Amino acid sequence: MDYTGSSEIDTRKVTTLRLLEMKKAGQKIVALTAYDALIARLLDESAVDLILVGDSLGNIVQGLPTTLPVTIEDTIYHTKAVVNGAKRALIVADMPFMSYQVSAEEAFRNAGRIMKETGCNGIKLEGGKLVVDAIERLTEAGIPAMGHLGLTPQSINKFGTYKVRGTDKEEAKQIYNDAKLLEEAGAFSIVLEKIPAELGKKITQDLKIPTIGIGAGPDCDGQVLVYTDMLGLTVDFNPRFVRRYARLYEDIKNAVIKYGDDIRKKSFPSIDESY
Ligand code: KIV
């Protein structure tokens, strides 16, 4: 594997235990989403520690306005592809809306199916107190579970907005308490999405398990972004927490326009590109 530019990288397969060790050692955890084997391989070779097969696949791959319609079958399809593409990264699959909310038993059955059919290393589910029983059940049975607090996109119809969560004292306290509950229930890590940096810092300091931030400030143990956002493939979504490292939307469009021009002016294929 070529970890270009990352000579200090531990090349062993990342495990949930390794994430804990990284937190203890003060080493930041690098996470991104992926939905297919090609991108998973690229991220893996670039030393991404954790690949999340987010239900953001509904927005990014399926072109849907929310993540709610994503099914277990969709999750399994995309997670299998990601598992095929990556060797080193820990792979976590998002549990789709309504695949874990009905009961801990149903969450267990669905999480078990996702793990068994895809070969991923853990699952993620959104929510606090309400998912504690599910997390206990999964953890007991050897299914590593990751929590997700703050902005939880599956609850869009409850909140009606994707704005920053935990800005008032009461909600901040609830998010903090939920983080504690998820840790006690056995979660191996928690995603903190779009909350004030101070709250992200406090939760990170007070938990033993690693926090992975997305719009939760610089003090989380790791950071995650949707890969299409940081590569500039999605151009209509510009929240403050996204830093763009490339402008692939423009690059791809320019390349495709050039390809079309070359065909139209009969310069592609050339004799050298022919048999
Ligand atoms: O679905 C997703 O991509 C996520 C990340 C934004 C954390 O949950």
Image (cartoon, rainbow, N blue to C red):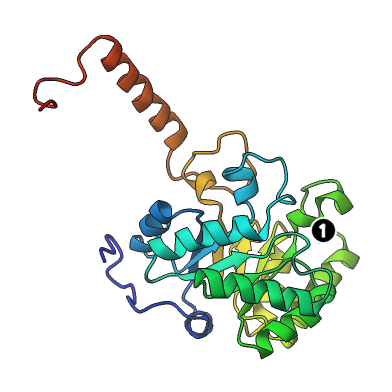
Write the residue at 35% across / 79% down: 12
> Horizontal and vertical percent for residue 218?
58, 63
Name the residue carrying label 1. Answer: 167
Above-or-below relation of 57 to 166: above
Q: Quadrant of the N terminus?
A: bottom left
Q: Choose top left, top right, bottom left or bottom right for residue 140.
A: bottom right
The answer to whether 190 appears left or right of 275 in the picture is: right
* Residue that sits furthest to the bottom in the current view: 140
- Count of marks placed on residues: 1
- In this picture, residue 115 sits left or right of residue 271: right
Q: Residue furthest top?
A: 265
Which residue of the protein is positioned furthest toward the right in this rendering? 170
Residue drawn at point x = 61 percent, y = 87 percent? 142
Q: Position of residue 9 (x, y in %)?
A: 33, 72
Picture layout, residue 241 above or below residue 9: above
In this orientation, which residue lies closer to the viewer: 171 or 79?
79
Q: Please say if 141 is above or below 245.
A: below
Mark 1 crowd level (few <14, some 14–19, many ≥20, 10 Å Cα): some
Residue 189 visible in this rendered orientation of the protein: no
- Foreground: 239 or 112? 112
Horizontal arrangement in the rendering, residue 64 relative to residue 83 (left or right): right
Disc 1 under 8 Å from ligand 1? The reply is no
Taking the spot 69% from the left edge, 67% from the top edge, the residue there is 200
- Quadrant containing the C terminus is top left
Q: Quadrant of residue 253?
A: top left
65 vs 193: above or below: above
Q: Position of residue 4 (x, y in %)?
A: 27, 60
Q: In the rendered structure, which amino acid carries the disc numbered 1?
A: Thr
Q: Residue at x 31, y 73 (%)?
A: 8
Numbered disc 1: secondary structure: loop
